[in-house]
Image (spheres, rainbow, N blue to C red):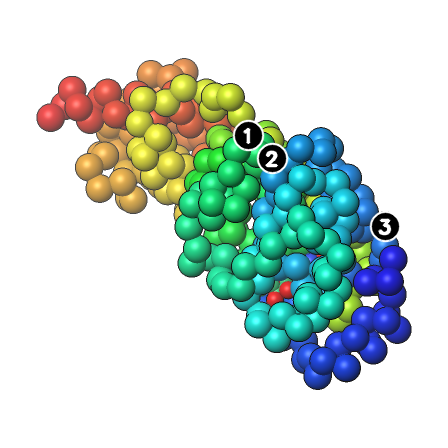
Amino acid sequence: MELTNTAYIRELLERHGFRFSKSLGQNFLTAAWVPEDIAAAGVPEEDLGVLEVGPGIGCLTRELSKRAEKVVSIELDRALKPILAETLADCPNVEIVYGDALKLDLAALAEDKLGGLKKAVCANLPYNVTSPLLTAFIEADCFDTITVMIQREVARRICAGSGCADYGAFGIFVQWHMEAELLFDVPPSCFMPQPKVTSSVIRLKRRGRPPAQAEDEGLLFRIVRAAFNQRRKTLVNALSSQLGKVTKEQAERAIANCGFDTRIRGEALDIGGFAKISDEIGRIVQADL
Ligand code: SAM
């Protein structure tokens, strides 16, 4: 593919006087198989409306355009505008929106641009804003799948289960809403300029319902965050020091009532365990009022 050929990219960027911005996470792909495989994983059906963030010079955008019904792609760097006008001139089903994906209302944009189509996200994300972007995609609540290339380290955290060193609050948040799957790794040699880290492609699929039941999701996630803010502490100590209204005795009682050892740490609990403890803490605090 021309758009991943380094000599072609250099000539294109030079002709347009383009300079890479590190702060915008600009690492463009230089291996044709990568955008092909990401698009194949992210757009398995032809009738999808796809949101991309960060088209760069458009190599993944072109692959998405071949497979999807419509592609809307958000790019923050306006210096790429004349380049994308050239590289995507023959892709009539692609619309580029210039703006900051973190500041846009993604649900409204998707509804406006992708209308009644089934919606998916597919992108090679700027790595410095991976977590806020993934949070925004999930909270937009309209994308059935989210297939993205991100730093391998973050991918591992998102897909980790309890007991793993990578297990943490962000992974639990993602897995509460989505089923997470690690698809494949991409080495630094596939990019220009080359990043210092390995990348991974993950696919998230929206769940019909969360993996466990919780009476109060707000409380559940306050508990999860407290547990991993101080992951070396026992759950009792982490909760009683960080959850304003919960005493040490109440935290101990809730954990014991759920059948867990009161010396347990949050990292040993799966999502269902957190949900159980969250419901019990809610009940105990209410009853003790
Ligand atoms: N898709 C291209 C590729 O795979 O070669 C480029 C991916 S590059 C890793 C990330 C892209 O995201 C860059 O084009 C960058 O300008 C853009 N970007 C960075 N922050 C952004 C933001 N907040 N909103 C929209 N685009 C952003």
Query: Which image quarter: residue 48?
Result: top right
- Image location (x, y in percent) of residue 84: 68, 66
Image coordinates for residue 239, horizontal then vertical, percent: 32, 38
Mark 2: which amino acid? Thr
Task: Report which quarter residue 144 is drawn in.
Answer: top right
Residue at image position (64%, 44%) is: 70
The residue at 20%/26% (across/down) is: 285
Mark closest to the chain's N terminus, 2 or 1: 2
Residue depicted at x 24% and y 20%: 283
Checking the image for residue 145, the label placed there is 2
**Quarter of the rendered structure image containing ligand 1:** bottom right
Disc assigned to residue 206: 1
Could one spot residue 282 in this view of the protein? yes
Left or right, 61 with respect to 247, comes to right
Image coordinates for residue 204, horizontal then vertical, percent: 61, 35
| Secondary-structure class at tag 2 | strand
Q: Residue at x 72, y 60 (%)?
A: 88
User: In the rendered view of the protein, which quadrant contains the N terminus?
Assistant: bottom right
Residue 171 in view of the camera: no
Q: Is mark 1 within 8 Å of ligand 1?
A: no
Mark 1: few/some/many CA within 10 Å (<14, 14-19, 20+): many
Q: Which residue is mark 3?
A: 33
Q: Above or below — where is 18 with respect to 276? A: below
Estimate how packed mark 2 is, as few (under 14), some (14 to 19) or many (20 or more) residues with alpha carbons within 10 Å.
many
